[in-house]
Amino acid sequence: MPLNLHLISDSTGETLNHVVRACVAQFEGAEVSQHIWTLIRSERQMAMVCEALVKTPGMVLFTIIQEPLRDMLMATCRAAGIPAIAVLDPVLSALSTALGRAAEHRPGRQHALDQSYYKRIEAMEFALACDDGQGLDKLNKAEVVLVGVSRTSKTPTCLYLANRGVFAANIPLVAGATPPPVLQELKKALIVGLTRDAGSLIDIRRNRLRALNEELETSYTERETVEKEVQAARRLFTQAGWPVIDVSRRSIEETSAEILALLGQRGEGVS
């Protein structure tokens, strides 16, 4: 039977989702049934959650700030013999000691409509405006420009970076076409070459064509042509002196983390 894992939050539950995804990934083949409870901020809401816990016991991870609601939850878990973990408590306790002050215990503060929030929105708009070689006249505002052949995860990586407040654009490399001259003129942006091994690139391109109901066997998926594309892209990256990331076996998150690390090395880390 799968483990019932209850994620209970007084905010969006994003923190819990990240923690659980990272932890469950360490248990290959484990069956986990997630029950997600978000924006739990009243005793009536918590009572409904507690009732569900008794019906489907398992394990509880929570980020609840208000003491009365925590007390209700913990009392139910103790009575039902359900293990419950306050995910943020160790970090809050350590920070409180280090800073010499108590936490303010206000739910959802990380999602406040502050300057960083509006920067993320602006960065997202920028990524969409400068996707796939568009908006070349806006590139002087870019912090990161990703360059690579088709299906090297340029767009999703840009969107992930935008969600971190990074202004990211991407430019495709097309066989037989010269990259836009603006790439040589950029002074501020970190330009990163993305590559992928020809085999996985062909598989991804075929899946894309299949989803579009298009012919699978074209120059777009022909091995010799794809290998030449990849080699030409690598030569360009080397000649230009751009850092290169092979995304063949990397998730979008891992690729983005490496790009953020490169930004950090330039003294432009994300705050």
Image: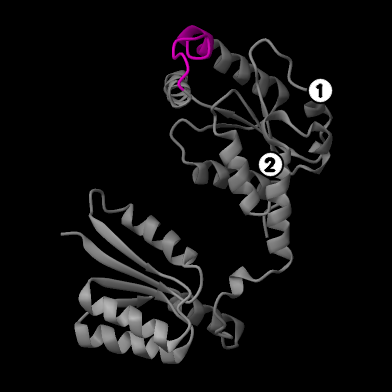
In the depicted view, which residue is nearer to us: 136 or 53? 53
Q: Which mark is residue 120?
A: none
Asked which secondary structure carries label 1, the reply is: loop
Marks 1 and 2 sit apart, C-alpha to C-alpha, by: 21 Å
Task: Look at mark 1 in the image and give the residue it sits on.
Answer: 181
Instruction: Answer yes or no: is residue 255 visible.
Output: yes
Report the span colored magenta. 213-227
Residue for badge 2: 128
**Vertical placement of residue 164 versus 89, above or below:** above
Q: Secondary structure at mark 2?
A: helix
* 10 Å crowding of disc 2: few (<14), some (14-19), many (20+): some
Location of the C terminus (image quadrant): bottom right
Q: Is residue 116 above or below residue 236?
A: below
Q: Is residue 39 above or below residue 101?
A: above
- Residue 59 lies within the magenta run: no
Name the main secondary structure of what is drawn in magenta: loop
**Residue displayed at 79% across by 37% down:** 139
Q: Residues within 10 Å of mark 1 (few under 14, many from 20)?
A: few
User: In the rendered structure, which disc, 1 or 2, sits on the residue that comes first in sequence?
Assistant: 2
Q: Amino acid at mark 2?
A: Leu
Residue at 44% in and 14% down: 216
